[in-house]
Image (tube, rainbow, N blue to C red):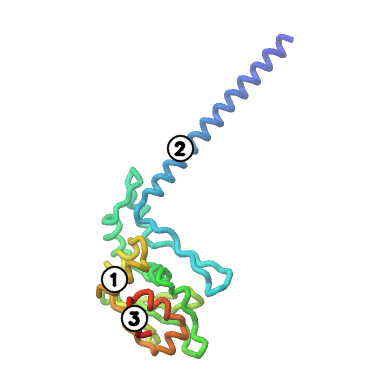
Amino acid sequence: MVSEKVLIRKKYRNLKKFSKIIIISLLIFVAFLVIFLIGYLINPTITGNFIASDNGSDNKIVVENPLNEIAIRKRNEKGEVFKEDIFGEALLEFDKKYIDYILLSLGADKLHKSKIGFGNPVIEFSIDGEVWSSEIIKGVPETKKQGSDNMDIEIIISKEEAVNALLSESIEDYMKNSVNSGDTEIKIVSGKTELLSKGYLEMYRDLIENNNNL
């Protein structure tokens, strides 16, 4: 009888000890999770992902802001990130992902192939002497570092202005202000019928105030 009581007490102590270990482990995990979330949420430059539909289908296209990777690398021990720390590195790493994200933020995923024979939408960028062209195929930009003979519109912008747009809270609002202030220029190349057949109307009017050209 005595031995049974001793055994029960021993089991109880072991169970109590095990429970303490579990509780401590959970508390440590929760603490690390809270620290991670705080570091992530106070980041002032990560603007999230762009989610677009594949031209009306059930497929979803998720595109991450290309500055997110830089922001994560530039985080200090407190989880803080400063725009000036991102800006210079973003200029050096500038590539097609920057253009794709800007285009999608401006509504390029809503552009579509012309139903009257003009083909896919094509947007050309002139960026500090570099020429890039983006063909929009089923709502997704296919961007290459080369010009195109089939471009519909040309966007003339500096890398600095493009990076500032990506750092802004609203790329659409930033680009609209940039166009209307003259820092960014949009040139119409294709005719009105072709542009309308590809769905440019809403995108163009959103960028240019008091526009009656399209």
User: Mark 2: which secondary structure?
Assistant: helix
- Give the foreground label among 1 and 2: 1
Residue 170, position as x, y percentages in the image:
36, 63
Residue 43, position as x, y percentages in the image:
36, 51
Amino acid type at circle 1 is Ser
Residue visible at 26% across and 77% down in the picture: 129
User: Mark 1: which secondary structure?
Assistant: helix
Looking at this view, is 96 or 80 the one in front?
A: 80
Amino acid type at circle 2 is Ala
Counting residues from the start of the chain, the first of labels 1 and 2 encountered is: 2
Residue 208, position as x, y percentages in the image:
33, 76
Q: Report which quarter residue 161 is drawn in.
A: bottom left
Looking at this view, is 107 or 152 the one in front?
A: 107
Residue 190, position as x, y percentages in the image:
38, 88
For residue 6, side relative to residue 166 (left or right) = right
- Give the foreground label among 1 and 3: 3
Question: Can you say which quadrant of the picture contains the N terminus?
Answer: top right
Q: Report which quarter residue 200 is drawn in.
A: bottom left
* Mark 2 neighbour density, 10 Å: few (under 14) some (14–19) many (20 or more): few
Counting residues from the start of the chain, the first of labels 1 and 3 encountered is: 1
Amino acid type at circle 3 is Asn
Residue visible at 25% across and 75% down in the picture: 182
Question: Can you say which quadrant of the picture contains the C terminus?
Answer: bottom left
Dot 3 corresponds to which residue? 211
Asked whether disc 1 touches disc 3, contact meaning CB atoms under 8 Å apart, the reply is no
For residue 20, side relative to residue 73 (left or right) = right
User: Mark 3: which secondary structure?
Assistant: loop
Dot 1 corresponds to which residue? 178
Image position of 60 with respect to 7: above or below: below
Circle number at residue 31: 2
Asked whether disc 1 touches disc 2, contact meaning CB atoms under 8 Å apart, the reply is no
* Mark 3 neighbour density, 10 Å: few (under 14) some (14–19) many (20 or more): few
